[in-house]
Image: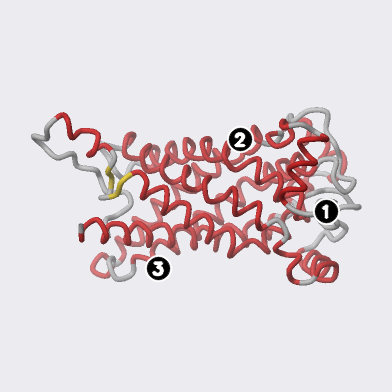
């Protein structure tokens, strides 16, 4: 399988009419194949780790009426006692509707940006980080509305019956702007998250493959999983405070959660500091890291496996 960061080599002496076909390819894949690979990777990642994400949301919501337990164990017991094990999957439908398209945009923009920004140096960490930032700005615009629905459905004693009920009630009671109240904070959070994530992933992957280059092809999935887990854990820890702000903006006014006069990140941070102190900005950091380390490993392994599948399919043709 071709390396994800391999330099794209443009064929020489190619007729101008074929330029569009060549531009659509990178690592031997076409644009739509990157989108499919990213979509499958996102769905597998979020579905596998969804229970942990539910616990994180309840710990970060920040209202005693919405979430009394402060610890991870207490959160697990609260959800299971109230709704059973299936309560950990409440909101999965909203995630599925948003994660597939968002990850398709995420990975395709990343691959295109990485190819464009690192032509002369395929191992340029600055290009990888910048590509990650561009990818997250685009994908967050797709995912934020469904993420808001997912977060509200994940709350303990959520007043919504399901995805359709949540969407219709939010539109009727709060307007379409409510779905994008956290978009600015999400971008502010995910820009450094993806910069750290992609730069760490590419560096860790390259370092692991250099340790045992003779076995690199045989251990490719192990390398992707290990590098992805390291990148996910580091980026998650770094951006937890902004994730708390995002959760509270998305859940405001539901189950007694605080409502804010604007979507200002600074206003929410000040409110959290007044109520909970600096510890409030790190609420849910354990489940967040427990989510992102394996989630990133699953996501990158699935993505690279899908790319390998498409490469073999293209070679056979």
Q: In this view, does 236 lie to the left or right of 284?
A: left
Q: Name the residue under label 3.
A: 222
Q: Mark 2 points at which residue?
A: 188
Whether 62 is drawn above or below 183: the answer is below
Q: Residues within 10 Å of mark 2 (few under 14, many from 20)?
A: some
Secondary-structure class at tag 2: helix
Q: How many labels does the image show?
A: 3
Q: In the rendering, at what x and y percent does residue 16 appear?
A: 15, 29
Within-10-Å neighbours for mark 1: few <14, some 14–19, many 20+? some
Asked whether residue 269 is in view, the answer is no
Front-lying residue, 163 or 283: 163
Quarter placement of the C terminus: bottom left
Q: Quadrant of the N terminus?
A: bottom left
User: Could you tell which of marks 3 and 1 lies nearer the N-terminus?
Assistant: 1
Numbered label attached to residue 230: none
**Callout 3 touching callout 1 (CB < 8 Å):** no
Residue visible at 58% across and 65% down? 48
């Amino acid at each position: 399988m071709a390396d994800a960061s391999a330099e794209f080599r443009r064929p020489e002496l190619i007729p101008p009419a074929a330029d569009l076909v060549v531009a659509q390819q990178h690592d031997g894949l076409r644009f739509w194949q990157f989108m499919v690979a990213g979509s499958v990777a996102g769905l597998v990642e979020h579905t596998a780790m969804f229970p942990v994400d539910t616990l994180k949301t309840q710990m970060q919501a920040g209202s005693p009426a919405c979430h009394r337990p402060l610890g991870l164990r207490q959160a697990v017991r609260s959800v299971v006692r109230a709704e059973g094990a299936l309560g950990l999957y409440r909101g999965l439908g909203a995630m599925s509707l948003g994660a597939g398209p968002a990850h398709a945009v995420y990975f395709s923009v990343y691959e295109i940006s990485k190819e464009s920004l690192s032509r002369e140096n395929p191992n340029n960490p600055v290009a990888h980080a910048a590509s990650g930032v561009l990818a997250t700005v685009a994908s967050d615009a797709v995912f934020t509305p469904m993420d808001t629905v997912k977060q509200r459905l994940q709350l303990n004693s959520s007043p919504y019956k399901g995805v359709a009920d949540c969407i219709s009630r939010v539109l009727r009671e709060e307007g379409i702007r409510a779905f994008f109240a956290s978009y600015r904070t999400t971008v502010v959070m995910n820009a450094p998250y993806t910069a750290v994530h992609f730069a760490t992933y590419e560096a860790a992957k390259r370092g692991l493959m250099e340790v045992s280059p003779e076995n690199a092809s045989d251990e490719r999935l192990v390398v992707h999983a290990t590098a992805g887990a390291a990148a996910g854990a580091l980026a998650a820890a770094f951006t937890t405070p902004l994730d708390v702000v995002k959760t509270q903006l998305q859940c405001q006014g539901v189950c007694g959660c605080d409502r804010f006069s604007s979507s200002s990140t600074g206003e929410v941070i000040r409110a959290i500091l007044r109520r909970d102190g600096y510890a409030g900005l790190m609420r849910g950091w354990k489940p967040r890291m427990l989510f992102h380390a394996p989630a990133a490993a699953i996501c990158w392994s699935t993505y690279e496996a899908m790319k390998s599948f498409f490469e073999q399919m293209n070679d056979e043709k």
